[in-house]
Image: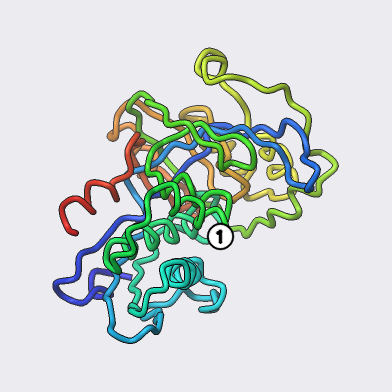
Amino acid sequence: MGESVFPPGLPVFTAPAKLNLFLHITGRRADGYHELQTLFQLLDFGDRLAFEVTADSGIHRVTGLPGVEVSEDLVVRAAHLLQAACHCREGCRIYIDKRLPLGGGLGGGSSDAATALRVLNHQWQCGLGVDELAELGRQLGADVPVFVRGYSAWGEGIGEELEPVELASRYFAVLRPEVAVSTARLFSSSQLTRDLQRITIRDFLATGGENVFEPVARSLYPEIDKAMNWLDNFARSRLTGTGSCVFAEFETRNTAQAVIDALPAGLVGFVAKGVNRSPLLSEMGKSL
């Protein structure tokens, strides 16, 4: 989609992507969920959304997502959830410029939902605080709260226990192999390591970490393995989350862009800067 998806005059907001710089499973909870440790790195690139408040209470997705039913769209669900929590009588029309791939492990749907919660909370004058919005977001998905809070963060629990972090400036080349990854298939694999020792932020900064889903994904999806092997020619490749996207970090944008410019046929990607603060926060300060 392009700029034309947005009506003239409507403020447009970023729903930033994220990378998991590592992802460990340290155990399993009584409710069946896995205990995780991860480091969420926000990016300066993502989907773009706009919201047009309406006098009626309808929630209308004007620009849709191919293959995603309205009832399953996290943005629409977020709007309904906030509307119910605030007993809001207004509605909205939602416009989305979808730039992040579905199922890529970049948090696109979760970030879109978080942007809806933050922006509509203001536009509908709901008055909810960030903690309340994060709790609403948690009902939509474990990754939504980090985007609601808007800071790169150390995550634990099922990913909802967050501690903001300040990470060094870096650039990332992000590649998207043409494959749809099943998260359920990764979680159910007998190859998956589920009992790593807990580490601290200091441990990670000193020695790094791994994504326990990476060897499983590489084994089950040859397209991911091929992309990572190619990217390893330039810098260490890593898988983000439980999606299909892989990435490597570089000190300058030009170095990262040179990698993207050299992509072989069949691979697509983009360059983004890692940021400690979501671009949405400054956009809201300017536009609302």
> Relative to 134, is 223 on the left or the right?
right
In front of the other: 232 or 32:
32
At 56% from the left and 60% from the top, the residue drawn is 140
In front of the other: 234 or 273:
273
Estimate the x, y position of residue 123 in percent, counting from the top left. 27, 66
At 85% from the left and 42% from the top, the residue drawn is 190
Estimate the x, y position of residue 135 in percent, counting from the top left. 51, 52
> Relative to 174, is 246 on the left or the right?
right
* Outermost residue toward the right in this view: 190
How are the colours assigned in the image? rainbow
At 58% from the left and 19% from the top, the residue drawn is 200
Estimate how packed mark 1 is, as few (under 14), some (14 to 19) or many (20 or more) residues with alpha carbons within 10 Å.
Answer: many
Estimate the x, y position of residue 251 in percent, counting from the top left. 34, 25
In the rendered view of the protein, which quadrant contains the N terminus? Answer: bottom left
> Relative to 183, is 90 on the left or the right?
left
Q: Quadrant of residue 191?
A: top right
Estimate the x, y position of residue 231 in percent, counting from the top left. 51, 36
At 28% from the left and 34% from the top, the residue drawn is 254
In the rendered view of the protein, which quadrant contains the C terminus? Answer: bottom left
Q: What type is the residue that disc 1 sits on?
A: Leu
Give the answer, above or below, for where 232 lies relative to 160: above
Give the answer, above or below, for where 144 lies relative to 41: below
Give the answer, above or below, for where 283 lies relative to 90: above
Q: Which residue is mark 1?
A: 140
Q: Quadrant of residue 88?
A: bottom left
Badge 1 marks a residue whose secondary structure is loop
